[in-house]
Amino acid sequence: MTVRWVVRSMYSGVPDMLAFENAGLRFRGGGGVEDLTFEVHPGEVVALIGPNGAGKTTLMRLALGMLRPQQGAVRLFDHPLSHLPSASWARVGALIEVPLAYPELTVRENLRIACYLHGSDPDRVPDALEAWRLAPVADRRFRHLSLGNRQRVGLAAALQHDPRLVVLDEPSNALDPASVILLRDQLAQRAKDGAAILVSSHYLDEVARIADRALLMNKGRMIGALDTTGSDLERTFFERVRQDDEHHSSAVEVLR
């Protein structure tokens, strides 16, 4: 019995932190997602994997209310997004595509603002600086940071208020190996403490190390799960996508 399984069992009577129920959204110019159904439980790390353009970022934007589904529903903390109390957003930590920060403010100032936005105590900032090894650049303006340091500021801002739901889009982008290990440890600890974590990644080896479940997306659809304990994950991943492409093409030809 794994430690993570024990943690999740402690929260077995608690509603899902995040749930998609046949959710779909189509854009005017084409693309989007359809028929998304899955849950993220307390104490669990769920990874989204798929080729570029598979719909991972769109799914995460739906999860955060940045987009609204045209079909189905998305629920946070057992509430539909349309009825979610505004105070509940303080329990969410997110990083989507690029860190949101004020370029002319320092790292320290940006983290203090992130605390205020989440209704959190700005006295947490020193701990966040230490945890993410940002103390040497704490008083440097954000626009002068390297891409890796910017990413760590974004992660610190997303996690320093101890959110119950964490949504991270390609969080290891621009990180050096030491920072990737730091991220891995942070997510493992937060899952152990009962947070629900949804993370997208194209680094399959990293997914295998951090995720309890890996959900595979292709062309806006959820096409199953990937066994992260198997060998040659990359080969298995591409084979699953190839099979789905062939199946989808055959179905389109039949409809014609």
Image (cartoon, helix red, strand yellow):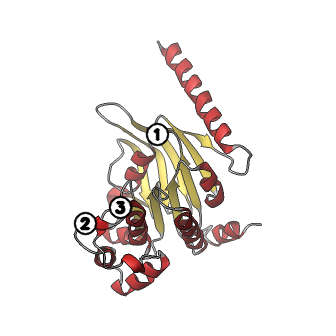
Q: Amino acid at mark 3?
A: Pro
Position of 189 compared to 220: left or right? Answer: right
Position of 247 compared to 99: left or right? Answer: right
206, above or below 71, in the image: below
Per the image, label 3 sits on a secondary structure element best described as loop
- Residue 140 placement (x, y as % from top left): 30, 75
Residue count near mark 2 (Cα–Cα under 10 Å), binned few <14, some 14–19, many ≥20: few
- Residue 115 placement (x, y as % from top left): 33, 77
Q: Which residue is mark 2?
A: 103
Residue count near mark 1 (Cα–Cα under 10 Å), binned few <14, some 14–19, many ≥20: few
- Residue 147 placement (x, y as % from top left): 39, 60
217, above or below 113, in the image: above
Q: Which residue is mark 3?
A: 99
Q: Along the line of sight, which residue is nearer the eye, 183 or 224?
A: 183
Q: Amino acid at mark 1?
A: Asn
Going from N to C along the chain, the mark reached first, 1 or 2, is 1
> Residue visible at 31% across and 79% down?
139
Q: Outermost residue, right direction?
A: 1
> Residue visible at 49% across and 43% down?
36
Q: CA distance from mark 1 to mark 2?
A: 28 Å
- Residue 247 picture quarter: top right
**Is the Cβ of the residue at disc 2 closer than 8 Å to that at disc 3?**
no
Residue count near mark 3 (Cα–Cα under 10 Å), binned few <14, some 14–19, many ≥20: some
Q: Outermost residue, left direction?
A: 104
- Residue 19 placement (x, y as % from top left): 49, 55
Q: Along the line of sight, which residue is nearer the eye, 98 or 117?
A: 98
Query: Which numbered marker is on residue 118?
Result: none
251, above or below 59, in the image: above
